[in-house]
């Protein structure tokens, strides 16, 4: 595996691969890799000739009072993990190479960013869409892999590639969880032991909602109530939102009639955790993941 540290070198490599007709898969990350990221790289390895993983803690997607400086970083550990799953190139640029002096172009995806994390973290998805479109231009992948844990991010990026005719297929992979159900996240490292124990309420609440859904419940208030009650049982949890939204537009819905996402964001101290569940009704059958 080779680590590429400049935008210039990455651009030249990508141009050469394109000429050779190689199919490139990109796994964008902010590093501090865990099994969730590695599952994306493994999927890319099965589909593509060349797998590029980017590691870039993107300053434009953090709000002024968020954890940009504190975000965990460990490049040498990430290099070992990425290599262990067959990543071919690690792209780890510097902030001033991605955003040189005078940088002033941003990608703003409207509508789908008005809800959930988009409403709670103003500017977050503008930063995500901007950096991901830059990565797509630099690496020129056919396919790009993202975790379903960031369900709204997937919806935003799907909208972006459709609207801007980007020739990239967005592939969303299932949430990877710890044994007790907590979704893997680089931010879990911020949790105290007690917070980490209680963090299980997010997935437990969603699991109870899934049971209700399987039994036939389609009403938003009923599904949200069970999640809210379970999360509310944890003394250290502070709910940011529990919402049932349309699976594509991310707008709130009252009942599930097609593809929906039940999404939660919860603070433990200053650490904000998110999780979600896809619930889908197709004529007589129902699906959840
Ligand atoms: O999901 C993430 O880690 C980031 O939002 C991404 C997609 C790498 C963009 O910085």
Image (cartoon, rainbow, N blue to C red):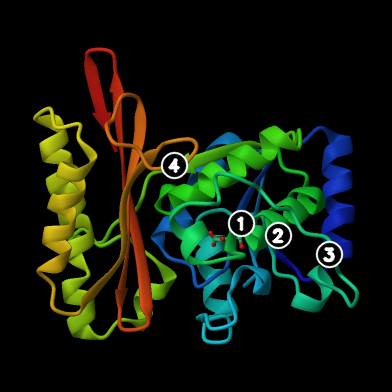
Q: Is mark 3 on a helix, strand or loop?
A: helix
Res 238 seen here: yes
The residue identified by callout 3 is 7
Q: Nearer the viewer, mark 1 or mark 2?
A: 2
Say which of 282 and 88 sits in front. Answer: 282
Q: Is mark 1 on a helix, strand or loop?
A: strand
Res 23 seen here: no
The residue identified by callout 4 is 251
Upstream in sequence: badge 1 or badge 2: 1
Say which of 219 and 7 sits in front. Answer: 219
Distance from Cα at disc 3 to Cα at disc 1: 14 Å
Q: Nearer the viewer, mark 3 or mark 4?
A: 4
Query: Which of the four quarters of the rendered structure image does ligand 1 lie in?
Result: bottom right
Distance from Cα at disc 1 to Cα at disc 4: 26 Å
Against 142, residue 186 (above or below) is: below
Upstream in sequence: badge 1 or badge 4: 1
Is ligand 1 within 8 Å of the beta carbon of the residue shown at mark 2? yes
The answer to whether the residues at label 1 and label 2 have Cβ atoms under 8 Å apart is yes
Say which of 120 and 83 sits in front. Answer: 120
* Residue 12 percent location from the top left of the image: 90, 54
Upstream in sequence: badge 2 or badge 4: 2
Distance from Cα at disc 3 to Cα at disc 4: 36 Å
Q: Is mark 4 on a helix, strand or loop?
A: loop
Q: Is mark 2 on a helix, strand or loop?
A: helix
The residue identified by callout 2 is 131
Residue plotted at (85% across, 66% down): 104
């Amino acid at each position: 595996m080779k680590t590429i540290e400049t935008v210039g070198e990455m651009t030249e490599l990508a141009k050469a691969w394109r000429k050779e007709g190689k199919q490139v898969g990109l796994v964008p990350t902010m590093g501090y890799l865990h099994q969730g990221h590695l599952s994306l790289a493994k999927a890319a390895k099965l589909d593509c000739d060349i797998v590029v993983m980017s590691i870039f803690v993107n300053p434009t997607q953090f709000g002024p009072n968020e954890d940009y400086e504190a975000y965990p970083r460990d490049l040498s550990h990430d290099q070992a993990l990425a290599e262990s799953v067959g990543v071919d190139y690690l792209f780890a640029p510097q902030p001033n190479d991605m955003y040189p002096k005078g940088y002033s172009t941003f990608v703003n995806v409207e509508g789908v960013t008005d809800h959930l994390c988009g409403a709670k973290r103003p500017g977050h998805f503008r930063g995500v869409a901007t950096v991901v479109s830059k990565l797509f231009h630099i690496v020129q992948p056919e396919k790009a892999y993202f975790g379903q844990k960031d369900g709204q991010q997937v919806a935003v990026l799907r909208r972006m590639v459709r609207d801007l005719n980007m020739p990239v297929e967005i592939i969303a992979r299932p949430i990877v969880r710890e044994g007790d159900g907590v979704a893997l996240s680089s931010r879990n490292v911020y949790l105290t032991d007690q917070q980490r124990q209680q963090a299980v309420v997010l997935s437990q609440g969603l699991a109870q909602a899934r049971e209700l859904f399987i039994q036939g419940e389609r009403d938003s208030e009923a599904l949200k109530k069970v999640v809210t009650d379970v999360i509310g049982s944890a003394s250290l949890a502070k709910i940011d939102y529990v919402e049932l939204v349309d699976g594509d537009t991310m707008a709130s819905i009252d009942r599930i009639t097609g593809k929906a996402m039940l999404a939660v964001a919860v603070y433990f101290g200053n650490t904000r955790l998110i999780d979600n569940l896809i619930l889908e009704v197709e004529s007589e059958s129902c699906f959840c993941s």
